[in-house]
Image (spheres, helix red, strand yellow):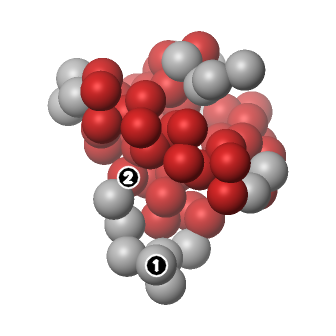
Amino acid sequence: MPAPQATTLDHVHAAMLLQAGGQAAALRATLEAETQRSPDFLRLANALSALYPKDSEEKRLLDAMLLVVPR
C-alpha cells in the first residue's frame, strides 16, 4: 500500500499495478480501503478511464479494476 503522504493519483496507479500483476486479494483490499477513505479515488479512476483511448492498456486496467470495486 502506498505511503500515507501519497496522492490519490499514486493510489490509483498502485491499484492499476496490482490489477496488472494479477494480485486480486491485494487489489480488493486496496480498493476497499480507498473507497472507505475518500470518494476521490473512484472519481479520479473514472475520470482517467474516460480520458484514456478506448484500446489503451491503461483504460483496460482501470475498467477491470473498477469492476471489482466494492459496492
* The quadrant where residue 61 appears: top left
Helix, strand or loop at label 2? It is helix
Q: Which residue is mark 1?
A: 4
Q: Callout 1: few (<14), some (14-19), or many (20+) C-alpha neighbours within 10 Å?
A: few
In this rendering, which labeled residue sits more in front, label 2 or label 1?
1
Q: Residue at x 60, y 64 (%)?
A: 8
Please identify the quadrant where the C terminus is shown: top right
- The answer to whether residue 34 shows anywhere in this view is yes
Instruction: Give how far across and how far down residue 56 sits, in percent.
Output: 47, 27
Q: Is residue 25 left or right of residue 11?
A: left
Q: Is residue 62 left or right of residue 50?
A: left
Q: Is residue 5 above or below residue 32?
A: below
The front one of 51 and 29 is 29
Instruction: Give how far across and how far down residue 28 sits, in percent.
Output: 43, 29
Q: Which mark is residue 14?
A: 2
- What amino acid is found at the position of numbered circle 2 in the picture? Ala
Please identify the quadrant where the N terminus is shown: bottom left
Q: Is residue 45 above or below residue 3?
A: above
Helix, strand or loop at label 1? It is loop
Q: Callout 2: few (<14), some (14-19), or many (20+) C-alpha neighbours within 10 Å?
A: some
